[in-house]
Image (cartoon, helix red, strand yellow):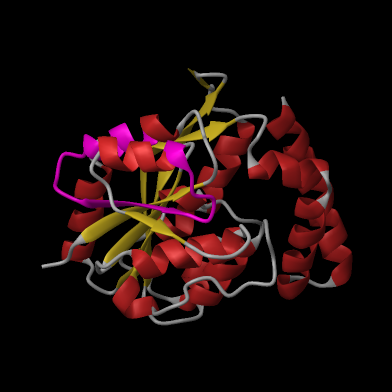
């Protein structure tokens, strides 16, 4: 019987981490929860004790890819969700994950829709949400989404997959999971690579998680220092010829502005 773990990547003293933990504690089926960090301190130790969670500490400087791979390695179950400390999960997230693998055992990546939290309020669904949902359409054909061209069809115009909504099958994918040269686009790069391997990408279009946008978020920092633009242009270059990359980036930059609104 498959088992599942939420591996929370915790960084310093997030004011949203406890809400994340509580959402995982309220799951409607039993699931594992672990805390993983490269920035240990009393704050995380106290939360680990309060919620009776294992706390794993990685030596070395903080790095998104290294931190995610560490969390992946520390999870001792078949199915792993690398949870981001600022986000929350619907109580039926884990139940839906287990039902997915019961029906489609060859699934390598599971993902869902999300709702956006901005300034502690749910953000209205907008054009960016609609575009991402349209891009994910190929992955809604569950009987076909084991085919490489179907999986990659969802990724050729950008990455519509909400990274913390994903659960991965550790036995199918091995360790390390992330092997990218990018910092921001490492999830898109990873999904593109995994799409070329055997296994099914399965998307459930229910908002089973709540994705938080705030001033200290890594995504916002990458937008402001142009790192996102450079990395996503590089990803487009792997898929499309140069002139079309410039056209696609023109529209993608408009999405950045919408993110800032």
Report the front residue among 50 and 161: 50
Residue 172 can be seen, yes or no = yes
Residue 128 is left or right of residue 261, and the answer is left
Is residue 33 one of those drawn in magenta? yes
Name the residue rendered at 79%, 39% in the picture.
Answer: 254
Q: Quadrant of residue 152?
A: bottom right
Report the front residue among 229 and 143: 229
- Where does the N terminus fall, quadrant-wise? bottom left
Residue 187 can be seen, yes or no = no
Q: How many numbered markers are drawn? A: 0
Residue 158 is left or right of residue 172, and the answer is right
Residue placed furthest toward the left:
1
Report the front residue among 80 and 202: 80
**Residue 199: % across, % down:** 36, 76
Q: What range of the chain is rendered magenta?
A: 20-43
Name the residue rendered at 53%, 67% in the picture.
Answer: 191
**Residue 110: % across, % down:** 36, 59
Residue 107 is left or right of residue 44, and the answer is left
**Residue 224: % across, % down:** 81, 40
Name the residue rendered at 83%, 63% in the picture.
Answer: 244
């Amino acid at each position: 019987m498959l088992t599942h773990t939420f591996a929370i990547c915790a960084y310093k003293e997030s004011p949203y981490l406890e809400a994340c933990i509580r959402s995982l504690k309220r799951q409607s089926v039993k699931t594992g929860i672990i805390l993983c960090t490269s920035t240990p301190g009393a704050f995380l130790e106290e939360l680990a004790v309060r919620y009776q969670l294992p706390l794993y500490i990685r030596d070395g400087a903080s790095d998104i890819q290294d931190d995610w791979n560490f969390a992946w390695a520390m999870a001792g179950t078949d199915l792993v969700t690398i949870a981001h400390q600022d986000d929350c999960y619907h109580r039926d997230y884990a139940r839906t994950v287990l039902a997915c693998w019961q029906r489609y055992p060859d699934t390598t990546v599971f993902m869902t829709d999300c709702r956006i939290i901005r300034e502690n309020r749910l953000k209205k669904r907008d054009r960016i949400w609609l575009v991402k949902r349209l891009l994910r359409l190929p992955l809604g054909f569950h009987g076909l989404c084991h085919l490489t061209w179907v999986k990659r069809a969802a990724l050729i115009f950008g990455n519509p997959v909400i990274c913390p909504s994903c659960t991965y099958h550790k036995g199918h994918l091995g360790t390390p999971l992330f092997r990218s040269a990018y910092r921001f686009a490492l999830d898109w790069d990873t999904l593109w690579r995994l799409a070329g391997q055997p296994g099914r990408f399965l998307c459930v279009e229910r908002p089973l998680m709540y994705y938080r946008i705030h001033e200290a978020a890594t995504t916002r920092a990458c937008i402001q220092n142009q790192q996102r633009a450079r990395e996503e242009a590089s990803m487009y270059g792997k898929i499309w010829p140069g002139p079309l990359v410039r056209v696609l980036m023109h529209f993608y930059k408009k999405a950045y502005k919408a993110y800032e609104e």
